[in-house]
């Protein structure tokens, strides 16, 4: 597996159509480097709770803060980086083999996830020590 590094992970601007009646942002075929196979969203996350705490062997994910804000802690097995998502026209593309934790959810926040794969438990690495072994770190 190629060694994905967190310094190569950045926010992507989602095209935004501005209109006096309200803005519209669109993620269409070709915007992401994969076909979207699953869409899910996180909401009503209690204060102080966190989500994530895993890595994927194959799947890639694109995270968008549709409402509110939250922090994504990224870890490639050697380095860590924190990214705040707080705009519905900006998203974070997380490649394969990156550990992620989501925390500091603001009240009313909604995190939309566009995934490259359907849910498959065998694709998840849920233990950090196993992740480090997987990465060879």
Image (cartoon, helix red, strand yellow):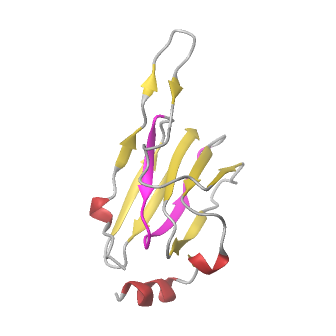
Q: Residue at x 42, y 64 (%)?
A: 95
* Residue 104: x %, y % from top left: 55, 54
Q: Where does the magenta region start and end?
A: 89-106
Provide residue 20's location: percent of width, then percent of height.
52, 9
Q: The C terminus appears in which quarter of the rendering?
A: bottom left
Is 96 placed above or below 132 here?
A: above
Q: Is residue 99 visible?
A: yes
Image: 55 above or below 135: above
Location of residue 56 in the rendering, given as x and y in whole percent from the top left corner: 52, 72
Q: Is-magenta flag for residue 54?
A: no
Q: Is residue 100 magenta?
A: yes
> Which residue is depicted at the point 48% across and 53% down?
71
Q: Is residue 19 above or below residue 124?
A: above
**Residue depicted at 52% across the width and 53% down the height:** 35
Seen from the viewer's position, the closer of residues 7 and 108 is 7
> Which residue does the image show at 43% across and 86% down from the upper left?
134
């Amino acid at each position: 597996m190629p060694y994905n590094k967190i310094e190569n992970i950045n926010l992507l601007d989602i095209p935004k159509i501005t209109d006096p009646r309200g803005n519209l942002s669109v993620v269409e075929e070709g915007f992401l480097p994969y076909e979207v196979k699953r869409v899910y969203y996180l909401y009503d996350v209690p204060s102080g709770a966190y989500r994530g705490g895993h890595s994927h062997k194959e799947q890639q994910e694109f995270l968008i803060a549709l409402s509110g804000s939250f922090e994504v802690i990224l870890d490639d097995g050697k380095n860590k980086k924190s990214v705040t998502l707080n705009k519905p026209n900006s998203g974070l593309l997380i490649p394969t083999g990156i550990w992620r934790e989501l925390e500091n959810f603001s009240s009313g926040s909604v995190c939309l996830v566009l995934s490259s794969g359907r849910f498959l438990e065998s694709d998840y690495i849920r233990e950090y020590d196993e992740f480090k072994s997987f990465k060879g770190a």
